[in-house]
Image (cartoon, rainbow, N blue to C red):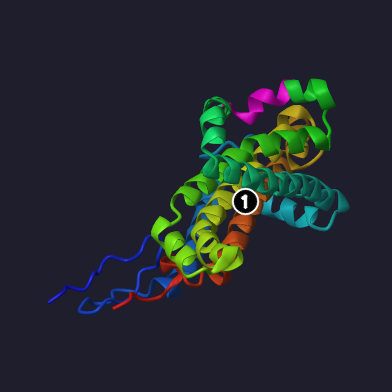
Amino acid sequence: MAVADLTPPAGARAEARPGLPVLWDSRATDHALGAASVLGVLALWEVLGRTGVLDAQVFPAASTVLSELWFLLGTGGYWADLWATLSSALTGLGLVLAIGTVAALLIGLIRFVESSTWIVVEFLKPIPPIALIPLGLLLWGPSPTMKVTLITFGALWPFLTQMVYGIRQTNNVALDMAASYRLGRWLTTTRIVVPTLLPYALTGLRISASIAVIVSVVTELIGGASGVGQTIAVAQVNNALPTMYAYVLTAGLLGVGINLVFQGLEKPLLFWHPSQRGGTDS
């Protein structure tokens, strides 16, 4: 008699399993625990700031920073900075999607391309895009073009790597069966190739999106391009610490927002994947 596999699929949430007691419902508590953690950190920050454990000249109290953030939400300059950062990250991510998809198909499907490019890819991957800021400034100055170029360079490699790996994971048996049944290129692509590639593509895009935001903010901070990072640097120079920390929180919230967007995309696009299914197959 076969024994049921009680190991949850990779990425799946904790669910009830036959014969095992349910200690808590993770779906019901995830958001509550996350909110409680945020409130706990803010409360600790506030207490340490008010009691003098943290130097107020360096770390203003959480309430002061949140009050400044609330004020900035009503100003046009804040939203202009946020859009400058976000638009550069999204433009770079779009270029990553286009370039990475074509490059991955060529590398994954054509042996000659893989053999002739792997040294170049392995050489370029470890280079941090921040190290190329001086070159970018020489070529384009502190402009959106400089930001988008460095964002594309830094965010390309996770997506490209995931796509190539996904192409290699395509089930050859399934492809041979599709050929034997003469399904044609369209059905083979939509029913076999795309479902195999999609989880890898979304994972790569999720990682690349986070890198895109980081590179966008850092190029503004160091390179002087307009956006959230530039305002952080200006506020620090002018000793406007509440404004500086408010923009730092904005950068963090931007990353959280992008992560939530990708979580929302995964549910409808990967509804068939084990990571999104509630239970296990019997």
Q: Residue furthest left?
A: 1
Residue 152 in view: yes
Q: Secondary structure at mark 1?
A: helix
| 37 is within the stretch colored magenta | no
Identify the residue at image location x=53%, y=43%.
108
Does residue 239 sit above or below 82 in this rendering? above
Give the total of numbered labels.
1
* Image-quadrant location for residue 225: top right
Instruction: Quadrant for the C terminus, please.
Output: bottom left
- Which of the pair 80/65 is nearer the observer? 80
- Which of the pair 169/251 is nearer the observer? 169
Instruction: Quadrant for the N terminus, please.
Output: bottom left
What type is the residue that disc 1 sits on? Answer: Gly
**Residue 135 rendering spot, x and y as whole percentages:** 74, 21
**Residue 16 rendering spot, x and y as whole percentages:** 31, 77
Identify the residue at image location x=23%, y=69%.
5
Identify the residue at image location x=57%, y=52%.
206
Does residue 199 sit above or below 264 in this rendering? above
**Residue 178 rendering spot, x and y as whole percentages:** 47, 66
Secondary structure that dominates the magenta span = helix
**Crowdedness of circle 1 by 10 Å Cα count: few (<14), some, many (20+)?**
some
Report the residue marked by disc 1.
Answer: 255
First to last magenta residue range? 127-134
Residue 225 in view: no
* Image-quadrant location for residue 240: top right
Left or right, residue 169 beside residue 211: left
Q: Residue furthest right?
A: 76
- Which of the pair 144/56 is nearer the observer? 144
Does residue 60 sit above or below 10 in this rendering? above
**Residue 111 rendering spot, x and y as whole percentages:** 51, 37
- Which of the pair 180/42 is nearer the observer? 180
